[in-house]
Image (tube, rainbow, N blue to C red):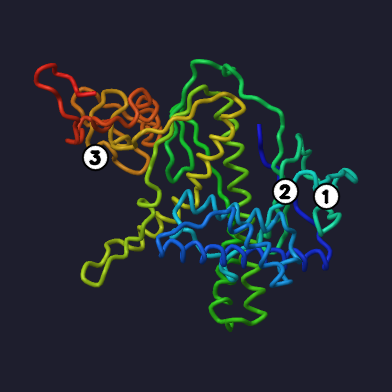
Amino acid sequence: MRTGRSYLLDLSPEQEEMCEEFGSICRSVWNTALEQRREYRRRGAWMNYAPQCAELADAKREHPWLKAAPSHALQQTLKDLDRACRDHGTFRVRWRSKARWSPSFRFPDAKQISVERLGRKWGRVKLPKLGWVRLRWSRPLGGEIRSATVSQKAGRWYVSFLVDDQAATGAKHAMPGTAVGIDRGVVAATTSDGDFHDRVFITAGEIIRYRRLQQRLARSKRGSANRRKTVAAMGLIVSRVSHRRGDFCAQTAARIAAKNCLVVLEDPRIKNMSASAVGTADAPGLRVAQKRGLNRAILDKGWHRLELALTNAARYTGTVVVKVNPAYTSQQCSACGFVTEDNRESQSVFACKAPGCGHRAHADVNAAINIKNAAGHAVSACGDLAVRRSVKQEPVSRATGRTPS
């Protein structure tokens, strides 16, 4: 099974300058190849990886500065562009801006990569044209290297190895018959068992520091050295928050996947849920400040990142991950099935208003139980998961009383 291993690099000034140059050349190749593909599409023709790779060899003879970067890294850039265009469409693939894009490049040939451990805390890796580079030995490789990607984040350089750890998904989960539903909300993950998985990713001191940096950035002159230092300091804080979020998602996903054979997630439209409430001049938005705060809370919890972590952890435990329609799961009573928006008294309190029921629970736990119960009829074409089902029904034959196949 293939997985990733990331390490912090300790580059010399010369090696750091070379990495900057390699990243700039790969960015230029990406943008040029993307423009060529778009121009061909405007004419009604196609341009693919093979002819672009052949033209890259001709471009090296005409532009010697392209020879500074490793050939395999440039070819891999064209491969990545080809895959992006096939997956998303030529005109939806983004340019790599010098100001917004973090330099990165990949070495796909494992034969040109060597890794050695120097001690308890340090190791080194040999990369084409860079030579031996020291790295922080934070964990064993645990497998055979397939490729290596060098990238810059918040002013620091990292190397990520794609390794084959020879692991295989078990034929049977260690705890068969177990299942759990997960509600993703302001609390990062609430399970149907009543467990709340959440943590704060940014400290109070970092919030104050970040606001001060924002004020300094607003007063700085564009293109100045002080502005670059301020942006780098802000990026360092954001990087720490991102690493904490990734660590939280990985640990939470590992615990949930180890204990459950089936994990049921709601399938929310995160892009629509986090859309701005600001309207137009003719139709201004309502409660813009409240919606802005909700959007920040949604994006801060990393819902999609938790989903990716669960999918990755499920490969090792044999857990099945299912996504269901989230419609009315927060308004439906998990005890009797009664649905009304009045059931949700507050953000955390659920009280069923059905006569003779009176079920009370934490609102997120109640929603997680509904999500778990919905796994048997997940997102069918015949309606929602609630009593007030949608009218988008499949046609029924009057003769047989069945839906046509």
The reply, left or right, for residue 282 in relation to residue 58 is: left
Disc 2 secondary structure class: strand
**Which quadrant of the rendered structure holds the N terminus?**
top right
Helix, strand or loop at mark 3: helix
Seen from the viewer's position, the closer of residues 287 and 246 is: 246
Looking at numbered disc 1 in the image, what kind of residue is underneath it?
A: Val
Label 1: state its secondary structure: strand
- Badge 1 crowding class, 10 Å Cα cut-off, few under 14, some 14 to 19, many 20 or more, is some
Q: Residue at x 49, y 19 (%)?
A: 178
Q: Which residue is rendered at x = 34% and y = 35% of the image?
A: 325
Residue 125 is labelled as: 1
- The answer to the question of whether label 3 and label 1 lie on touching residues, with beta carbons closer than 8 A, is no
Which residue bears the numbered disc 2? Answer: 148
Is 61 rendered above or below residue 316?
below
Residue at point 36%, 63% (across, down)? 289
Picture quadrant of residue 355: top left
Q: Nearer the viewer, mark 3 or mark 1?
A: 1
Distance in Å between CA atoms under marks 3 and 1: 58 Å
Identify which residue, 1 or 203, lies in the foreground: 1
- Callout 2 amino acid: Ala
User: Would residue 90 appear left or right of 360 to someone viewing this image?
Assistant: right
Q: Earlier in the sequence, mark 3 or mark 1?
A: 1
Residues tagged 2 and 1 counted as in contact (Cβ below 8 A): yes
Q: Specify whether 69 is left or right of 279.
A: right
- Position of residue 187 measured from the top left corner of the image (x, y, whole percent): 46, 43
- The image position of residue 54, as x and y in percent, is 64, 58
Which class describes the residues within 10 Å of circle 3: few (<14), some (14-19), or many (20+)?
few
Report which quarter residue 241 is drawn in.
bottom right
Q: Is residue 215 above or below residue 287?
A: below
- Label 2–label 3 contact, CB within 8 A: no
Alpha-carbon span between mark 2 and mark 1: 10 Å
Check disc 3 and report the residue beneath it: 341
